[in-house]
Amino acid sequence: MTNSVVIENKISAIKKYLKILSHYKKYSQKEIVSNLDIKGAVERYLYLVCQATIDLAEAMIAHKNFRKPTTMSEAFYILNEEEIISHQLTEKMIKMVGFRNILAHVYEKIDYEIVYEVLQKRLKDIKTFTEKISKGK
């Protein structure tokens, strides 16, 4: 599979996850936390959209033959260095990597104020990122 196909597949997956997550925006933070099915779905789809975004960054780096990142966060710094994304968007994506790591590794101590903030207000950053990658390939 070529890198451009991988990029398109990752963008498609991200769009799918964003659409699924949009259905959960109607719930209050309290409703999400108190319903284990909704809570689990929100956590899982937030994790998946974050991971797919990281994978997209890495696919773009491979496609453009940029230097290889040694960490997930570094992938976004490289895209900034190569003028694919802005410094501001880079910082937002770095925070997204940290959020993804919390979902993956510190899942018993998740702060639902942050989860709710990401669900309601930060997913637009991922959408912006995918748009920049689409233009930059």
Image (tube, helix red, strand yellow):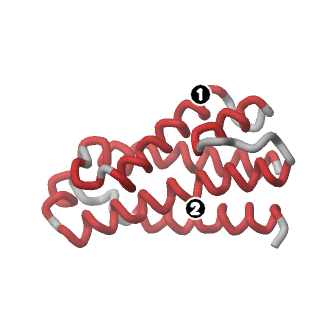
- How many other residues sit within 10 Å of disc 2, few (<14), some (14-19) or many (≥20)? many
Residue where numbered disc 2 is placed: 14
Q: Secondary structure at mark 1?
A: helix
Q: Earlier in the sequence, mark 1 or mark 2?
A: 2
Q: Which mark is residue 67?
A: none
Q: Callout 2, which amino acid?
A: Ile
Q: Residue sitting at 75 percent across and 44 percent down?
A: 68
Describe residue 121's horizontal placement relative to residue 131 as left or right.
left
Q: Residue at x 25, y 42 (%)?
A: 113
Between residue 20 and residue 74, name the one nearer to us. Answer: 74
Q: Secondary structure at mark 2?
A: helix
The residue that appears at 57% across and 59% down in the rendered structure is 52
Report which quarter residue 20 is drawn in: bottom left
Q: Is residue 33 above or below residue 67?
A: below
- Type of amino acid under label 1: Gln
Residue topped by disc 1: 88
Residue 23 sits in quarter: bottom left
Q: What percent of the width, then of the height, locates residue 111?
A: 24, 44
> 106 or 94, which lies in front?
106
Residue drawn at 64 percent across, 26 percent down: 87
Residue 89: x and y in percent read 60, 34
